[in-house]
Amino acid sequence: MRKFINVQSVKTALLLLLMLSSGFSGCICDNDNPIQNSSVPQLKSSLLISTDAGENWTVKAIGSQSELNNLCYSYSTGGYRIVVSGHDGVVLNTLNYGETFSNSGPFSGFSYYGAGFSASDGRITLTSGSNNFVASTDGGETWYTKSTGNLFISYIDINPALTLFQAACSIGDRKNIYISTNGGNNWIVKSADAGNDDDFCGIRFVRGNIILAYGADGLMLRSTNYGENWSRITLPATSRIISAACNFEWQTVVSNTNLSGKFLKSTDLGSTWELKDIVRVNGYTPDKFAMSYSGEVFGAGVSGSMAKSTDMGETWRVIQSGTDANFKDIIYINNSLMAALAFKQVY
């Protein structure tokens, strides 16, 4: 007796065998359309290096699946050591401008908000928003963890002119400003004119005894006595301030994320401020700022946006970054050498 083979049944059986043998993840369709695989986003961080003061950039893949937020650097016997850090306790360093990376972590339970460093003496402190931080006293070669007891530190800066002097601040329900004069071994809580709705986004030494702390809704606090007392500065804008940059001329630049094509500039050590124009790049306003020793100012932001000023922020021009990722941090290492950290999700 002749047996008839059901063609559709054979196709289904072959498809099931294929799935079992290849670890297939997708969908079974009862038609002849191709099987569609689901896409999973991958997290990609990149280190960008410029050796000509930001005119041209080289993009180096970091290879970490974690979101990286912070850049710092130090001098070492092998040259400049650049350190990147971020979520999931990741701390990486490179001595060859991103060609290869060495893993200094991870440190379990940490995700780093900010990094304070003094390149001249090798001090680096990475803050996590918790009552612990990770630090190095040899430029990132070795690391240790330190508890701050009941103090929760989110952002930090280190004054390179004053040995072991550091300033920090916290966010959320525990918002405070802290000062340490012994490298973070002990901290003193300092009262500051910050309301209940205020939230810090950073803290910065401007010069010697002058410190600025800044954050949401135009929050700008200033101390002229090493953080002992603080006064609130009235700004011509009430947007979130997320970055600050200064140089040895002690003129400070800060950015406002909610003001399109604008930034804030001070020429008197942060005592008074004016609202200035900055070029938009592909519809975005650069919001991470860096300033060189010679006074050049650089801005980087969303979707690879970059801009440069050679006259202390009076005029700007667009710079091609070579990436469409979002910039998380940017620093001058010297007047010619720069580093930037970018991050994006790739599907």
Image: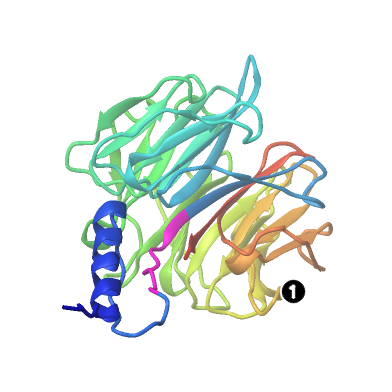
Which residue is farthest top?
A: 77
Number of labels in the image equals: 1
Few, some or many residues within 10 Å of mark 1 (<14, 14–19, 20+): many
- Residue 119 percent location from the top left of the image: 59, 29
SS label for mark 1: loop
Q: Is residue 272 visible?
A: no
Residue 296, visible in the rendered structure = yes
Q: Residue at x 61, y 26 (%)?
A: 95
Q: Residue at x 65, y 50 (%)?
A: 246
226 in relation to 24, above or below: above
Residue 187 is drawn in which quadrant?
Answer: top left
Report which quarter residue 194 is drawn in. Answer: bottom left
Q: Against 177, is 266 above or below?
A: below
Q: Quadrant of the N terminus?
A: bottom left
Point out the stretch of residues depicted in magenta.
35-43
- What's the image's color scheme? rainbow
In the image: residue 138, left or right of residue 260: left
Q: Name the residue beneath numbered marker 1.
A: 279
